[in-house]
Amino acid sequence: DTAVSQTPKYLVTQMGNDKSIKCEQNLGHDTMYWYKQDSKKFLKIMFSYNNKELIINETVPNRFSPKSPDKAHLNLHINSLELGDSAVYFCASSQSGALSYEQYFGPGTRLTVT
Amino acid sequence: TQLLEQSPQFLSIQEGENLTVYCNSSSVFSSLQWYRQEPGEGPVLLVTVVTGGEVKKLKRLTFQFGDARKDSSLHITAAQPGDTGLYLCAGFTSGTYKYIFGTGTRLKVLA
């Protein structure tokens, strides 16, 4: 059974389009995260939700909007995609909102904006 | 801006050799974690250290948290090809509620 799953695995789209990435975890965790990993493999936290409530919102363009319909799902919607949005996006979850807790990462979604 | 600098950036060694990866910052962390990431996959947590001076061992891997909780090291004994991957440290500061990843160390162990 996959603990944290993301869809799609690969996403190729043109500038200006709107796209969504979905994430689901079946671990019963309360907290979910979105991370962005750039071409140099630098990983940066974008958002964190605890029980459907936003608790971390790092400085990211407001074109990025997370949505958590329930605590097992955290989707990422991106409006007006730009070339610089190309990266691998990882979803993660943890048992608690404390970031020191073990985080389980999904396999990533490679977004390519052309 | 908080930074976690890892060194070396790249490391290519022969099977059986020992190596150490460093993770340094000017910030104090409440806890620090080490992850390993393989191509096409997400990072997998290896260890969490929370106490200054703490040493944890995971088979051939030894992790140490600096006394001042600003730095950490990962030592691998008798490296194997299966150790190949991207090693990332990540630190949490409870005061500012920030979680940042290090710059990463790409390790390649040759058979």
Image: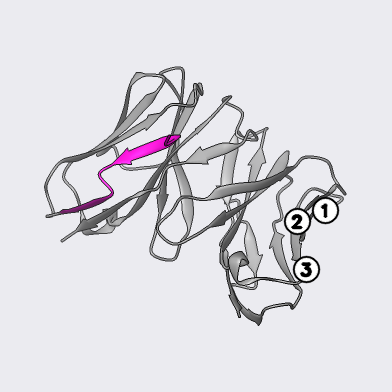
Task: Identify the magenta region.
Answer: A1-12
Q: Given the image, what chain letter belongs to the residue carrying mark 2?
A: B
Rendering quarter of residue A77: top left
Closest to the camera, between mark 3 and mark 1, is 3
Look at mark 2 in the image and give the residue it sits on.
Answer: B72
Q: Amino acid at mark 1?
A: Gly
Same-chain check, marks 3 and 1: yes
Q: Is residue A6 above or below residue B60?
A: above
> Where is mark 3, residue-wise?
B77
Tell me if residue A28 comes above or below residue B7 in the rendering: above
Residue B13 falls left or right of residue A55? right
Amino acid type, residue under disc 3 in the picture: Thr
How many neighbours does mark 2 have within 10 angstroms: few (below 14), some (14-19), or many (20 or more)? many
Whether residues under marks 2 and 1 lie with C-beta atoms below 8 angstroms apart, the answer is yes
A32 or B91, nearer to the observer: A32
Q: Position of residue A40 (x, y in %)?
A: 44, 66
The quadrant the C terminus of chain B occupies is bottom right
Q: Which residue is mark 1?
A: B66
